[in-house]
Image (cartoon, rainbow, N blue to C red):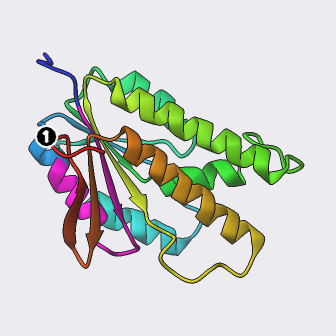
Amino acid sequence: MSFTNQGKLVLVLGGSRSGKSRFAEGLARRLGNKILYIATAAVYDEEMARRVQLHRDRRPAAWDTREEPLHVIEAVQESANRYHVLLLDCLTLWLTNLLLNDDISGPATPWPDKEKYLLSLVTQLATTCQNCRSSVVVVSNEVGLGLVPDNPLGRAFRDVAGSANQILAHYADEVYFVAAGLPIELKSRACTI
């Protein structure tokens, strides 16, 4: 497989059931033929298993899938030169997995240190994606538009997810926001700040 130029980094944001994954899948199809779907969901119950199955059923059989709940940066690094497009779905599930994994950030670690560590991983992911010869499409939830969570962990997650989205958006060539299945372009190479 030959690459003629550097790939691009695309961020697709949206709320739950907004159509962001479906839109990202369409983008991936337009960006190349050889596609790797990097799935970050960890299945712990029947409801999550059903959600994962919906995504699996929708993906073309020709796409490869790598389930990677924790080591996403390594998955991108290892796969970047073998695929035209890497589709990472999703950033916020990866953050959840990292946040809840005591091996990654110990339970006694103060929140500011955990947040700093998580955001450093997001920056590392962004620069890794930006330097890929593959195009990378990252799906993420916009979690800051709803109610303020009623517990400290929920508020911490909302804040780190918002900061993570800002980091990815800064590095991305294109950013889209999807609501009710309709994409809105927020950033493109043609109009960067």
| Residue, disc 1 | 31
The N terminus lies in quadrant: top left
The C terminus lies in quadrant: top left
Total labels drawn: 1
Furthest-right residue in this view:
108
Residue situated in front as seen by the camera: 120 or 140: 120
Q: Is residue 86 magenta?
A: no
Which residue is rendered at x = 44% and y = 63% of the image? Answer: 141
Q: Determine whether 142 is above or below 70 in the image.
A: below
Residue 64 position within the rendered picture, expressed as x and y whole percent measured from the top left: 27, 39
* Residue 7 visible, this orientation: yes
Q: Is residue 12 magenta?
A: yes
Q: Which residues are magenta?
A: 8-27
Which residue is rendered at x = 76% and y = 40% of the image? Answer: 103
Which residue is rendered at x = 32% and y = 62% of the image? Answer: 55
Q: Determine whether 2 is above or below 25 in the image.
A: above
